[in-house]
Amino acid sequence: MEITQMFTGLIETTGKIVRICGSESMTLGILPESSNFDVLQGGSVSINGTCLTLESSDGAVLFFTAVRETLSRTTFNKARLGDIVNLERALPVNGRLDGHFVLGHVDAVGTIKSDRKSGNGIDRSIKIPEKLHRFMAEKGSVAIDGISLTIAGCSDCEICISFIPHTLDKTTMVLKRTGDEVNIECDVLARYLARLIDNKNEKSGDSDRSRKSVIDRLERLGF
């Protein structure tokens, strides 16, 4: 049985892109900030929320390849030398899950629309593609550039994230500005729930009734 690599969305360290080569597929050389970021060859790493495989290393520099499909769905198609990225190793089988289930499969790219000071942190509005709206809910989870975050509010075209000082200091979010793009991964549980409701709708032909049936069942199961 194949086991999908999984992450928590809790960033371990950041790294700097020190080498880039290729166009249709891109090889990235990344230098982790932490000297304790040990990864075995063939191991999975979430880089700005994108699951990539460590192919080789040269000293402390780690090399990964982003294929055409990855480039088309993520911000890596605009990667530049010197860019800082979020890094997290795959969750070990006996690891503690403190964030939420993050697969490293980016759904789309969003754009930062505005920042508003909120105490020592910031409230950041991010424009998201229409196709992701149904997976977003207030107090739900989302991964932004690989960071497990709680949605403070959402509308038809934007989500709002409240960043605390710790998250800003320990990730690339402190460097982001209005107009910057970010990788977005929807909560996998929200995606499966939406699929379950869609399947019910297709079979019953009564979307309201089938939706209520699914919700009632989830409530009975304790969700």
Image (cartoon, rainbow, N blue to C red):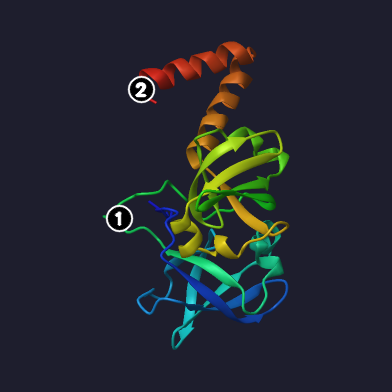
Q: In which quarter of the image is residue 156?
A: top right
**Quick check: 184 above or below 138?**
below
If the image is split into quadrants, where does the C terminus sit? top left
Which mark is on residue 161?
A: none
Helix or strand or loop: what does disc 2 sit on? loop
Q: List x then y, in percent, for residue 64.
A: 54, 74
In the picture, measured across the screen, residue 63 lies left or right of residue 7, that is right
Q: Earlier in the sequence, mark 2 or mark 1?
A: 1
Write the residue at 61% across / 19% down: 201
In the picture, measured across the screen, residue 88 lies left or right of residue 49, that is left
Local crowd at mark 1 within 10 Å, few (<14), some, or many (≥20)?
Answer: few
Q: Mark 2 points at which residue?
A: 221
**Alpha carbon distance from label 2 to label 1:** 25 Å
Write the residue at 49% across / 19% down: 214
Q: Is residue 124 visible?
A: yes
Q: Given the image, on which type of amino acid does mark 1 rest? A: Val
Local crowd at mark 2 within 10 Å, few (<14), some, or many (≥20)?
Answer: few
Q: Name the residue under label 1.
A: 93
Most foreground residue, 184 or 177: 177
